[in-house]
Image (cartoon, rainbow, N blue to C red):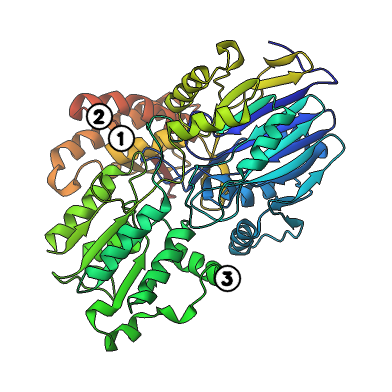
Amino acid sequence: MIKKDGTSTSIVALGGLGEVGKNMYVVSHKDEILIVDAGVMFPTDDLLGVDAVIQDVTYLKQNEDKIVGLVITHGHEDHIGGIPYLLQSVRIPKIYAAKIALDLINKKLVDQNIKYQEMEAVSGDSVIKTKYFTLEFVNTTHSIPDSYALAIHTPNGTIFETGDFKFDLTPIGPAPDLHKMARISEQGVKLLMSDSTNALSPGFSASENVVDEALENIINKHPARIIIATFASNIYRIKHIAETCKKHNRKIVVDGRSMKTIVELALNNGLIKDKDIFVDFNDTKSLKKNEVCVLCTGSQGEPLAALSRIANGTHKQITLVPDDLVVFSSNPIPGNADSVNKVINKLYLKGVHVFTNSEFSDIHASGHGKQEEQKLMLRLIKPEYFMPCHGEYRMLKKHAELGEMCGIPKENIFIMKNGNTLIMDQNGVHRGEDIQAGDIYVDGSRIGDIGSIVIKDRKLMSNDGILLTILNINPFTKKLLIKPNVTTRGFVMVNENSDLINHIERKVTYIVNSTLDKGNYNYTDLKNQIILELHPYISDLTGRHPIIIPVIMEVKEN
């Protein structure tokens, strides 16, 4: 490992490597630190009760006085969702982001009652200069407007960070700025950090225009109500749906909190022109079935989202009828396939028509470039060194292989983990010393209080339940007054397992009396002894390992 000296530049990921989400990349030179993105990752099923996963920002806290700003590549949750938590932990002098991203960030801060004013809107023409860094923003194509790659010019060379990108040559919004990319490339790029999300997918991603044609065909031809579920963040998709519904005389009902937020944002920023196309549920009573389109959340099978409630029959305003058509204008995110399939099955049981994306119907296009687009980025930027980012390990590995195919020497390609540091100096790019990085769990208003032990306990409770033993002890005589009361939650039904409960009560009575007879005990020792002896006893009887909670109550006899 090479230690950083006073003239080198370091690059480290605090999130985004070996995972999809919580992107955060930190570039340091002497007494300046630049942060790129501050995303959130949504918890997997095994993180019970956890609302979000964010970065361990200990390194930033330790070097807070060096931070010159946070730069945002675009407004998706995995790039901006961690900002409210970051601002509660670290002083950030300024946030630089495009107008759409700033609106989304402001909404988050208002929702969490965080006051922060130091924000600056940027565009594709913006240039930000600090003592050691010069930043240029480069227009890219993604599924949300105002998405940028970053050219970070440092004293030791240029870093090109792609953000999330695809090469859509017939986009709904602005085209990628190929000329600016080529110009930066000709000036020399030392290190490319490139989006790996679709590195396992061969070919080119579909153009959003192809999706628009498929959706227009559906909206035009279906003779009854249409319900479309898509990602709320895909503003261009929502914009096209609005324009197509207007063209074919359909009104749109927006359902789902995040969808309503995005539609309001798109209207306020002029991305959607016609406000009158949107109506509420009451207005649809006077409309014909073929004049209604419901635009909702729930494309990933989220249990509380609008589409799940519609499928379950628990939605207050929508009751499905056989001639309804439900369109999934999305693909399941890895890990969500089972949830999506459950919703689809419920919809079929209701007798409605269901349309999903497939090789025969292009009703969704990814916002991330596939292998050929990743190769194009590599050829266009022509970096000396390459660090795949934004993806799980298998994606990073495949992207590294694509880098080799495009002529980058294997020794110049770095597959990194969160906390691994790259050192960039006049001699090249090398691995440096690791820094602290990891996952921090957010549970409600608590940040970082939920550790692996708590998660383990929650898993135990979800699998084996809880067993409480309530003890009444005279504090003067140090005697158990009545037999212990044993109650459970999620372990066994007490009324149906009286023999088992009686065995456990007798065992607890024996443990307590034996401990009390010895004298010189305290309540903590007594509780620990009950847990120590009761665990193997219950395991032998049932094969299960509930969490055991002894409760001691002092009762003074008359």
In the image, farthest residue toward the bottom = 286
Work out whether residue 73 or residue 219 is closer to the camera in this orientation and state it. 219
> CB atoms at circles 2 and 3 under 8 Å apart?
no
Q: Residue at x 36, y 39 (%)?
A: 334
Secondary structure state at the residue bearing disc 3: loop
> In this image, 52 relative to 307: left or right?
right
**What amino acid does circle 1 point to?**
Pro
**What amino acid does circle 2 point to?**
Ile
Query: Which residue, given by chain and number where applicable, does mark 2 sit on?
Result: 538
Work out whether residue 64 or residue 294 is closer to the camera in this orientation and state it. 294
Query: How packed is label 2: few (under 14 Cα within 10 Å), some, or many (20 or more)?
Result: some
> In this image, 28 relative to 513: left or right?
right
Q: Quadrant of the C terminus?
A: bottom left
Residue 223 x, y percent position in the rendering: 19, 74
Query: Between disc 3 and disc 1, whose residue precedes?
Result: 3
Asked if residue 328 is positioned above or below residue 546 in the image, the reply reads below
**What amino acid does circle 3 point to?**
Gly
> CB atoms at circles 1 and 2 under 8 Å apart?
yes
Secondary structure state at the residue bearing disc 2: helix
- Residue 22 in which image quadrant: top right
> CB atoms at circles 3 and 1 under 8 Å apart?
no
Work out whether residue 57 can be spotted. Answer: no
Query: Which residue, given by chain and number where applicable, does mark 3 sit on?
Result: 270
In the image, farthest residue toward the right = 131
Asked if residue 284 is positioned above or below residue 197 in the image, the reply reads below
Q: CA distance from mark 3 to mark 1?
A: 56 Å
